[in-house]
Amino acid sequence: MWANPSSPHAEGRKARAALEDARGRVKAALGWEGEVIFTSGASEAAALALHGAKAGNRMLGATEHDALRKAAPDAVILPVLPDGSIDLDALEAALAAHPGALVAVQSLNSETGNWLDLPEVADRVKAAAGLLLFDASQSAGKYKLSKYGDMGIVAAHKFGGPVGVGALLVRDYAMLSPSGGHERGYRRGTENLPGVLGMAAALEVGGEPYLGWDSGAAMQALAAQVRAAGGEWLGDRLDASTAYIHAIAMPGMSATAQVMRFDMMGFAVSQGSACSSGSMKTSAVLAAMGVEPDVAARTIRVSLGWNSTGVEVEAFAAAWAEMARRA
């Protein structure tokens, strides 16, 4: 399966058949009725959408991932409320000033785990003749894909697939300008067929519930422990939290120190976005939500992967409690 799917020889035709079969499997597993453009991951998918969408101004929620901000540095930034939700009044005002815009928002925030009310956003974008791009990097393969939106971003490694492959979901190719010779002319570079096959397989074995144990109960037990120790479970501030991603502030210790100490104990946590090349900067997401600087400086991001276990959560809870006691 290492042949180029665009090659006309027999091996290339076999590769093309396997690629199109995987495309159908991905669409079926996600419940997506539009088109699928395979990419090298979420960052490329975001860039394709933000650069190529046939829309006017670009608008981004204030808590969006850095990849979207870098792909659209001149975008209008939409403020969020203290609970992490989009300020709908501000969105309506921005759309009134810039009708026909492309609005990009995360369906599930990558740092806090807050769910976005996509139907509310979609209604306003549609009324202003705009397009809605939803970043489903954290939710696809774990929860049912949103039926609201014109384009969607998917990253395979977030649901147990290979690193380096993802997709841009497009309701209709007519919404996007072509940019290359592959994927029906919408991207450059030969498709990563082994990665695409792995992505399809991961989606088919995943689904709800994402984990085979009660992760919600385990994380709520951790939350109770955090509150009892004088820490802050930032999920208490959110509009709608999830079981898989949480932000936790420890009393008396900086997030930077926590990341290093947990690493020495065998736990991989992060400060802000895990994709910021090892950055130890305070989270821009928390700042946009108005979280107090002192709290933000002590907040780490804790998330569960497809292979996380209840035993690991219990071990982390014990380690967190001991570290907080010493702090």
Image (cartoon, rainbow, N blue to C red):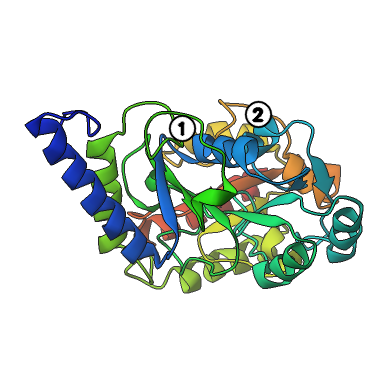
Callout 1 amino acid = Met
> Which residue is at the front of the view, 324 or 153?
153
Mark 2 or mark 1: whose residue is earlier in sequence: 1
Q: Could you say where residue 239 lies in the image, as x and y percent from the top left?
A: 73, 69
Q: Is residue 222 left or right of residue 207?
A: right
| Mark 2 → mark 1, Cα distance in angstroms | 16 Å
Looking at this view, name the residue that lies furthest to the left. 10
Q: Which residue is mark 2?
A: 280
10 Å neighbourhood of mark 1: few (<14), some, or many (≥20)?
few
Q: Nearer the viewer, mark 2 or mark 1?
A: 2
Dot 2: what SS?
loop
The residue lying at 51 percent from left, 56 percent from top is 172
Callout 2 amino acid = Met
Q: Is residue 182 left or right of residue 97?
A: left
The reply to whether discs 2 and 1 touch (Cβ–Cβ < 8 Å) is no
Visible in this render: residue 176?
yes
The residue lying at 32 percent from left, 47 percent from top is 161
The residue lying at 59 percent from left, 30 percent from top is 276
Q: Could you say where residue 211 lies in the image, as x and y percent from the top left?
A: 36, 65
